[in-house]
Image (cartoon, rainbow, N blue to C red):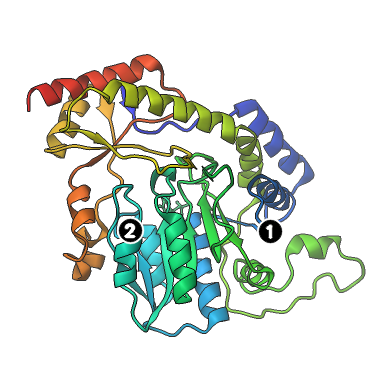
Amino acid sequence: MNIPLFVPTYRVDECLAEIRDCLEKGWTGLGYKTIEFEERWKEYTGFQHAHFLHSATAGLSLAVEVLKMTKGWKKGDEIITTPLTFVSTNHTIRYHALKPVFADVDHYLCLDPDDMVKRITPKTRAVLFVGMSGNTGQYERVVELCKQHGLALILDAAHMAGTRLHGCIPGKEADAVVYSFQAVKNLPTADGGMVCFHEAAQDHLVRKLSWLGINKDTYTRTNAEGQYRWLYDVEHVGYKYHGNSIMAAIGLVQLRYLDQDNAYRKQLCTWYEQALADVGPAISVIPVAPDCDSSRHLFMISAPARNELLALLNENGIFPGVHYRINTAYRMYRHARGQCPIAESMSDRIISLPLHLRMTYADIQTITNVIKQYVNNL
Ligand SMILES: *Cc1c(COP(=O)(O)O)cnc(C)c1O
């Protein structure tokens, strides 16, 4: 029996019932369930604002654009970011003619605040922090430094659905927090994302930008009184980035189980940690920051001769992943290579072991036994 990296799990009957509501009502688009999902997400996180989109990539792009517009950033202004992330994170800076400036990562594989400070220039406008694997890393120090240096803060929380820091959902200090509900994330729909702005005016603006710059959504219009419900203005050259009610319907069900699902992920990680406790110094488990109750999106280890271990795991029907190759290994970011030695070396060492809700204690033993066999042969 193969053990894949990710297997999304859905409460099928509950999802179908929510989707049925949409189909029977004849409302599958923007509005209706998208609004309900935004309301539930605000209750769950405690954020003031939340706007549902078709992806986190759209959310990050709009976060950058809205902050650029409202804060008057110029072409060529800089955002400090991590090179160890899904390319989506850094593409969204480039979409808006801004420059991603890479800072190195720490032992949590999150942005290292000490290295981040060294990258600040007169053109720096913001920091983009990625909560790798659900971990908050040294997020609080990054928040302090952003305040001190007058920088905006965007939190790429694609891995962080359900993460708590000191018992609370982190991100209230950030200008924008962006979640992913893509198919393999902790709250899987098929594709979806949420952007949560701190400022009401920015939330208002993003709702227009995500629907072509139109200043009223269809649902509001259909429910408005009078003969002018068709009338709207177009205030911006916006995008078609908003989410739809079918995805929100799935999201509503998944959200009910998010904490329960994350608790099982945590259990699986504890079993991994116990099984790897005596494996020796060759393998290290990427730690979770103190006071962080991680969503445990990924369980990551660092290993020498990583590709050989991957091959051995594959031979045994185990299919881990790598999150991520350093972005400067890609042609589009190659110009910036050599600036982040820790990220560079970790990029060749990290493995994300299988982690999903259908796994059992026995699966963890199978996987960790292969790792032990590999270490013994080193
Ligand atoms: C998945 C992911 C994204 C993009 O999310 P989508 O919803 O697929 O657009 C961005 N950043 C990180 C760190 C991710 O893992």
- From the top left corner, tell me how far across and down residue 145 is, in percent: 43, 67
Q: Position of residue 21 (x, y in %)?
A: 75, 39
Q: Quadrant of the N terminus?
A: top left
Residue drawn at x 13%, y 38% as measured from the top left = 304
Q: Residues within 10 Å of mark 2 (few under 14, many from 20)?
A: many
Q: Nearer the viewer, residue 4 or 217?
A: 4
Which mark is first along the chain, 2 or 1? 1
Q: Nearer the viewer, mark 1 or mark 2?
A: 2
Q: Nearer the viewer, residue 218 or 84?
A: 84
Q: Is residue 156 left or right of residue 304?
A: right
Q: Is residue 129 above or below residue 318?
A: below
Whether residue 367 sits left or right of residue 166 in the image: it is: left
Q: Mark on residue 11? A: none
User: Taking the image as drawn, is residue 271 in sight?
Assistant: yes
- Residue at point 22% right, 49% down? 347
At label 1, which amino acid type do we have? Gln
Label 1 – label 2 distance at C-alpha? 28 Å
- x then y, percent, for residue 373: 15, 20
The residue lying toward the viewer, choosing from 364 and 2, is: 364
For label 1, the SS is loop
Under mark 2, the amino acid is Asp
Give SS at disc 2: loop
Quadrant housing the C terminus: top left
Q: Which residue is mark 2?
A: 112
In which quarter of the view is residue 125 placed? bottom left
Q: Give the class, few, some or many, for how many residues have Cα within 10 Å of label 1's Cα (few <14, many ≥20).
A: some
- Is residue 1 visible in this depiction of the protein? no
Left or right of residue 313, residue 291 in this image: right
Residue position marked by numbered label 1 in the rendering: 48
